[in-house]
Every structure is written in C-alpha cells, then in structure tokens.
Amino acid sequence: MAAKVFTQNPICSPSLIRDKTPQQKHNLGHFSLSKNTSKRLVVSSSIMSPPIPSSPLALPSSSSSSSSFSSSQVFPPSRAPAATLPLSRIWREIQGSNNWENLIDPLSPILQQEITRYGNLLSASYKGFDLNPDSKRYLNCKYGKKNLLKESGIHDPDGYQLTKYIYATPDVNLNPIKNEPNRARWIGYVAVSSDESVKRLGRRDIVVTFRGTVTNHEWLANLKSSLTPARLDPHNPRPDVKVESGFLGLYTSGESESKFGLESCREQLLSEISRLMNKHKGEEMSITLAGHSMGSSLAHLLAYDIAELGMNQRSDEKAVPVTVFSFAGPRVGNLGFKKRCEELGVKVLRITNINDPITKLPGFLFNENFRSLGGVYELPWSCSCYTHVGVELTLDFFDVQNISCVHDLETYINLVNRPRCSRSAVNEDNFGGDFLNRTSEMMFGKGRRRALHLTNAATNAAYLLCSISNHMLYYNIF
C-alpha cells in the first residue's frame, strides 16, 4: 500500500505544548499522510504529560507568534481549515458528513476541541465506576445521574443531562462448577445536550459513552475473537455482516436467569435513544457515540444497529447523523460489516496510537491488509478477515517506565489536545531525539531502520500483553 511520509524541519515541526514540569520531555512530532482512505495525524512523544484536566481547548494566541507557530507555517495556507466559523454552522462536517475531509491534516482546531470534549465525557465512565467489592455500589456507578459529570471534573457539567445509566452482562462464566449467574455491571450512560448547549452546538446532541475493559468477565469476553453474523435486523439477517462474538455477546446478553434481571445492553440503549428522539422530534439532532477500547466496539455495534434498523431516519427530513468517536478501539467486524456501515452512512473517527497493540487486534495477521494479492486478486479468506471501519487519526507515544500509557484514555486525550509546541520547546526537548535520529540515518540503511521500528513495535506489544496478564493474575482471573 503506497504511502507518503513528510518529515518537517525540527524548527517547524508540530509537537506538544510543554508544561513547565521538570519530568516532562517530548520528542519531535511529525505528520504521516497515506494515499488510502485512512487519514493520519501523527504526534510523537516519548515521556507523557500528566493527565489533562477536563477543560475547554485553549487555542494559540495570534499575538504570540514568537513562542508558537500557526498551521500556515507548517502547511500551505490553502489547506488549513477555516477556524473562524462557529461549531453551530459546521457541526455536520465535524460529525463526519464529508469523512473529515481537510479536517485531519492539519487537525482542525474545532475538531480537536470536539474530540477532547467527547473524550472527557467518556472519561466519566471510568471515574464513576465503583470497583470496591465492599461498597454497596460495587460494579455500579458511584454517583447519581445529576452529579456524575460534576464529580468527574467535567468542564460545563450542565451542558448535558444524563438520562439513563447503561449496564452490560458478559456471557461468560468464570466458575462453571458453581454455575453462578452473570451479574450486569455499569458500562456507561446516555445523555442529551441541554437547551443552552443546543445554541452553541447547533443541534440537540444525544451522547452515549462506553468505558473499556475493567472486570475479569469482560477480559474473557474480549478473548472470544471468532467472527459471527450480527443478525441485528430480524427482517434482514445479512449473514455476510459478521462481528466479533465476544463484543456481540456483551452487547446482546442480559440477566435472563433472574426474573427481575436487567435487559441486554442493546435493549436498554435502543429504548432510551428512541424515547429521546421522539421527545425532541422536529429539532436538528445528532447521535454521538464515544467509546474507549472494548467500549469502542460497543459504540460501533450500536451505531450499526441504529442505522440498520432505520432509527435515525425521519420522514421528509434529513437522516440524523450517527457518529462514533473511537479511542484505542480494536477491530470489530469483517469487510461485510465495514461495507454495510458505509452504505448506511455511519461515520467513525478512530483515534489510535501506533504503539498500542489493542488497535491491531483482533486479526493481527489476517486483516484488511491481507485481503488481496497485489491489490487486484481477492484472496479466498477475505470475507473472514477483520477490517477497521472509518477514518483514522493516529498518535505516536510510548513510555518505557509506564507501558500501559500506550492504551490509556487520559493520555490519548492529552496528546490530541496538545498537538503543537513553541519553537524553544522543540529545540530544547528534541535535541537528544534529533541527535539519535541523525545517528540512526548515518549508521543504518533504510531497510535496517525499518526492521528496528518493527522490533520496537513488537516489544511494545509484548510489554502491554505482560501488563494485561499481570492485571488478570492480580484479580485471580484463573
């Protein structure tokens, strides 16, 4: 697959805004452009910043040109997206109506702000989850719906009103001898923008957030990586549309063993979204799904489900946009799933880290890159290959002292929120990295350097898998 890589001069390359903390250092950022449908913004860093506070994006001041540089210094002015239009006028483009054309490279400040905002809303699904076995709220949310955003430190907690908590039941049994019924656990929430926020957003926004894998049952559900037909539309099963069985089970399983058990995650969500759409009928509206890791997979499934059932269609009106903001998400389905999502108009923006092995699973070997021979001949197993959906915005970060940071949501948000730094910070922070890069170019040929990069990526994957294994052993998963 042909690709072009542009490396900027160290003085002009975008990197990270530097906090004045002694432990923080950043390497030079660079941009990578690909000719395929995936679009990439690559921002490099070796030692990560402290977690970003939940605050609105601070854009560089035009008056401080000596300490920061504008996009026109790195990119031709004609390619820089207009940042003067308010969100209320371009919200459809920000939601992916044009597949984020001219918004990824360079990264539009408004899109950057919206990714950060949805990432912060998503972080509340982690901060509110109670993992204390002695707590009365164990496996539930620590806070009530009115207080979750405020207690989680979300900027403008009154911008959205939480309407429903969502629970999921993994269809796995850790102790088959006792045959204990599976217990649902809190996995996210549904919220709708307030009347005041509608003026700024330009529409009524329904948001659904999904946290990633935390409990042992969820880890085991993730390991069920076989493809299975989704069959979410009873009138048209579409057996060619296949998704990972573990994600599908988490999405469709409920507490069926209990008389008063919860409905499946799917039934809870479709019911609440339908209610909200009827309540705000006639208004401009959007449906935005934000998920991290496993939660990204559930967001994909919900987006496909809504569009396949036609819930976002309105008579004599435009269809309600359905958009997924995926943070560190794995592959969800096969090529049939990808094509059907595109046919239905589901928009997916995947924010990934090239050092995060979770984004390369499942289908580490047999995926969208191994479906055809020479780009012409379709291979027999192409229909059984996992395939990513949507447009990709890629980050590049790794910390050898904290391996798990490559998959951490806070780190993702931090990097997206800080894609530029001052000239002085670039010169000061990147001296060592630039020296090593130049030394590498002198000592090794292109092929040797590529091999070193592959070795480094494999090492990162091994480190993270070891970290996951330690987590599972710590909680006595076996």
Image (cartoon, rainbow, N blue to C red):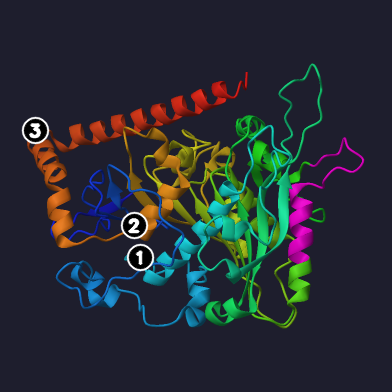
The residue that label 3 is drawn on is 443
Tell me the element at label 2: loop
Q: Are marks 1 and 2 in contact (CB under 8 Å)?
A: yes
Mark 1 to mark 2: distance in Å?
7 Å
> Around disc 3, counting alpha carbons within 10 Å, would you say few (fewer than 14), some (14 to 19), or many (20 or more)?
few
Q: Secondary structure at mark 3?
A: helix
Q: How far across and down, in percent of the image, does residue 168 sit?
A: 72, 44
The residue range painted magenta reads: 254-274
x, y percent for residue 369: 44, 42
Residue 477 placement (x, y as % from top left): 62, 22
Q: How packed is label 1: few (under 14 Cα within 10 Å), some, or many (20 or more)?
A: some
Location of residue 132 with respect to 166 vertically, above or below: above
The amino acid marked with disc number 2 is Leu
Which of the marked residues, 1 or 3, is nearer the chain's N terminus?
Answer: 1
Q: Which mark is residue 107?
A: 1
Dot 1 falls on a residue whose secondary structure is: loop
Residue type for callout 3: Met
Quarter-wise, where is residue 250 in the image? top right
Residue 327 percent across, percent down from the top left: 49, 51
Residue at horizontal 22 percent and vertical 47 percent from the top:
27
Q: Judge whether residue 470 is colored magenta.
A: no
Q: Which mark is residue 41?
A: 2
Front: mark 1 or 3? 1
Residue lying farthest to the left in this orientation: 442
Q: For the point 13% across and 51% down, which residue is it? A: 428
In the rendered image, the residue lying farthest to the right is 259
CB under 8 Å between discs 1 and 3: no
Kindly identify which numbered label has been placed on residue 6: none
Among the two numbered marks 2 and 3 on one chain, the one whose residue lies closer to the N terminus: 2
- 270 part of magenta stretch: yes
Tell me the quarter of the image containing the C terminus: top right
The reply to whether residue 371 is visible in this rendering is no
